[in-house]
Image (cartoon, helix red, strand yellow):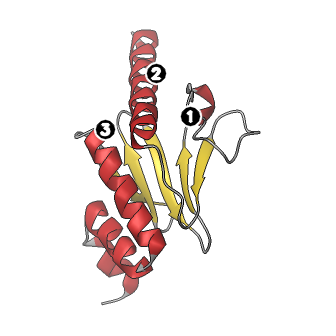
Amino acid sequence: MNKSASTETQSASELIDKRIADLGDWRGETLSAIRKLIKEGDPDVVEEWKWMGTPVWSHDGIICTGESYKSVVKLTFAKGASLEDPAKLFNSSLDGNVRRAIDIHEGEALDADAFKALIHAAIALNTSSKKSRSKRAK
């Protein structure tokens, strides 16, 4: 079975499981821990697999993506520039008008409560945007 056919038969959650296992180092552990926090923050989150292999978490729109690079795990919030970040978790992609990211390097810890607050804020923004679109459509 070729690679694209095998990924078409696996769910996004299975593909994310595989990515975590394939990383096999601190990046996989970090991505796994982040995934757990996202699911704790939103038990209804939808896991997706987009853009040739990027884990994506959504709820009424994209919350964030989880990319893994050689020296960093990057969590990009689709509408991060519109989110309050009192704990200053965003440390990357700060110049853009829409997205914001959190870069996690080996050995760094993430404030779980502050991260879950960002997840909740992203969901609230997505939900309010969806309601606004529905009202305009009527």
- Disc 3 element: helix
Type of the residue with mark 3: Gly
* Residue furthest out toward the bottom: 1
Alpha carbon distance from label 1 to label 3: 17 Å
Q: Is residue 77 above or below residue 84?
A: below
Q: Earlier in the sequence, mark 1 or mark 3?
A: 3
Type of the residue with mark 2: Ser
The residue at 62%/40% (across/down) is 99
Type of the residue with mark 1: Lys
Residue 55 screen position, x and y as percent: 42, 59
Q: Which mark is residue 79?
A: 1
The residue at 56%/34% (across/down) is 79
Residue 76 screen position, x and y as percent: 56, 48
The residue at 43%/63% (across/down) is 30
Q: Residues within 10 Å of mark 3 (few under 14, many from 20)?
A: some
Q: Is residue 42 left or right of residue 19?
A: left
Give the position of the C terminus as an image quadrant: top left
**Depth check: 127 or 27 in front?**
27
Q: Is residue 77 above or below residue 52?
A: above
Q: Which mark is residue 129?
A: 2
